Amino acid sequence: MERAIRICPQPVPYGSGTEALKVVRHQVGLRASGGFGFQANYGMVNQVVSIVIDVLRLARGANL
């Protein structure tokens, strides 16, 4: 958060640091895989690779 304030100081009053920030909501750990991210990772990656290959084939008009 300190690096973010150095890059973009507008969210806090001039001269303030991270102590001026207020946590509105915690959203850590909310994943699309319903908590099975590690186990489901391989299946999701295979689907993404398949989609990318299909898109490249359409764009190039060639088989990969």
Image (cartoon, rainbow, N blue to C red):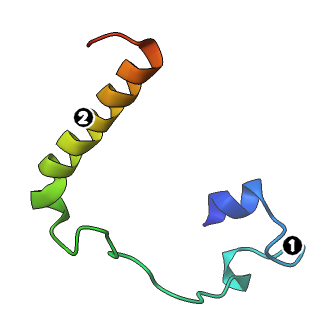
The picture quadrant where one finds residue 13 is bottom right
Q: Which residue is mark 1?
A: 15
Disc 1 is placed on an element classified as loop
The residue carrying pointer 2 sits among few (fewer than 14), some (14 to 19) or many (20 or more) residues within 10 Å by Cα, namely few
At 59% from the left and 89% from the top, the residue drawn is: 24
At 41% from the left and 22% from the top, the residue drawn is: 58
In the depicted structure, whether residue 62 falls above or below residue 58: above
Name the residue furthest top.
62
* Quadrant holding the C terminus: top left
Disc 2 is placed on an element classified as helix
The picture quadrant where one finds residue 20 is bottom right
The picture quadrant where one finds residue 31 is bottom left
Q: Position of residue 55 (x, y in %)?
A: 39, 29
Q: Position of residue 46 (x, y in %)?
A: 18, 40
* Quadrant holding the N terminus: bottom right
Q: Earlier in the sequence, mark 1 or mark 2?
A: 1
Mark drawn on residue 50: 2
Q: Amino acid at mark 2?
A: Ser
Q: Is 46 or 4 nearer to us in this picture?
A: 46
Q: Amino acid at mark 1?
A: Gly
Q: Position of residue 17 (x, y in %)?
A: 73, 74
Q: Is 28 or 41 nearer to us in this picture?
A: 41
